[in-house]
Amino acid sequence: MAGLSAMQHPYVSVEGVTRAYPGHVVFRDLWFGVNRGEFVCLVGHSGCGKTTVLNILAGLDAPDAGGVIVDGQEIRGPSLDRAVIFQGHALMPWMTAEQNVVFALSCRHPRWGKARLRDAAREALDKVGLGQAADRRPAMLSGGMKQRVGIARALALDPKMLLMDEPFSALDALTRSALQDEVARLVAEANQTAFMITHDVDEAILLADRILLMTNGPDARIAETVVNTLAKPRNRATLHKLPGYHALRDHILEFLLTRSRTLAGTRPPGWDPTSPPEVRPAEAPLPVAAQ
Ligand SMILES: Nc1ncnc2c1ncn2[C@@H]1O[C@H](COP(=O)(O)OP(=O)(O)OP(=O)(O)O)[C@@H](O)[C@H]1O
Ligand SMILES: [Mg+2]
């Protein structure tokens, strides 16, 4: 693997990662970093390889070339240092909300006693507004409540990196925006390093510090990095009033509607995968100039 010294790595460093199936290169030579406390979103069309990227970051899948370094250590497999919130809630149905969180915490802290685990789980559930529902099993919780338990469980682990794969896409619009605001608040409070995949442009604009735009597959690449300079804290109700919001949104939509397709499978002359163009539409709208 191309070696940067440990001092030069961002907190999370994806270095030259390639994943291919027989006869099908999903993506090739991906390079990007996530700084400590930063929130990065990956946006791209269905099938371009977003979940594959996330699975590699989680250690659930391995790259065919390149590697991922988190806090100075190369990823070798799954770890509780990297908590995942999936699209489905992935709770254990026979356990209550509290028991689900306690179970994850007991794996993370095998020496903690019952009372300590229970207190930590209660605190995590309180933070997502589920203190009253701690004793309910998943079947007795709404879809939004189940996702909240998943968020509580992930954040209770105090992971080095929080990974989310379209965590709100199965929820109705109102529940989704409430949970988006909640994740924005909780991640900011914990200064949590986060990586999220989403199809929802407003969700990316609400949450991300940087948005990676991925071309369609096969042979996908990150065509550019959009820096989100919109003022924080942000919330769904007022997001569209922030100066620069429309330029940023138009830029991402234009990529998804046009350039994700026209750039698919291409590498422009002089293309440097280690530093895709950085665009700041909120300050200087660049609708189509960047590659
Ligand atoms: N086990 C596998 N064997 C063969 N091909 C696979 C396998 N897993 C994924 N792929 C292919 O890799 C590509 C990327 O899949 P991936 O699930 O990462 O896409 P995605 O961007 O997350 O899509 P979506 O937005 O629909 O979730 C797809 O073309 C998919 O068919
Ligand atoms: Mg996916």
Image (spheres, rainbow, N blue to C red):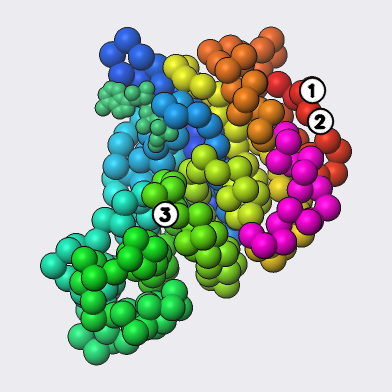
Whether the residues at callouts 2 and 1 have beta carbons within 8 Å, the answer is yes
**Closer to the camera: disc 3 or disc 1?**
3
> Does the segment drawn in magenta span residue 216?
no
The residue to which callout 2 is attached is 286
Q: Is residue 93 left or right of residue 173?
A: left
Residue 41 coordinates in the image, percent (x, y):
56, 45
The amino acid marked with disc number 1 is: Ala
* Front one among 241 and 120: 241
Whether the residues at callouts 2 and 3 have beta carbons within 8 Å, the answer is no
The residue to which callout 3 is attached is 171
Q: Is residue 151 left or right of residue 37?
A: left
Query: Where does the magenta region start and end?
Result: 236-251
Which image quarter holds the C terminus?
Answer: top right
Q: Earlier in the sequence, mark 2 or mark 3?
A: 3
The amino acid marked with disc number 3 is: Leu
> Does the segment drawn in magenta span residue 241?
yes
**Is the residue 270 above or below the residue 104 in the image?**
above
Q: Earlier in the sequence, mark 3 or mark 1?
A: 3
* CA–CA distance in space, label 2 to label 3: 33 Å
For ligand 1, tell me if the residue under mark 3 lies within 8 Å: no
* Front one among 93 and 116: 93
Q: Residue at x 50, y 29 (%)?
A: 45
The residue to which callout 1 is attached is 289
Overall secondary structure of the magenta stretch?
helix
Residue 49 coordinates in the image, percent (x, y):
43, 29
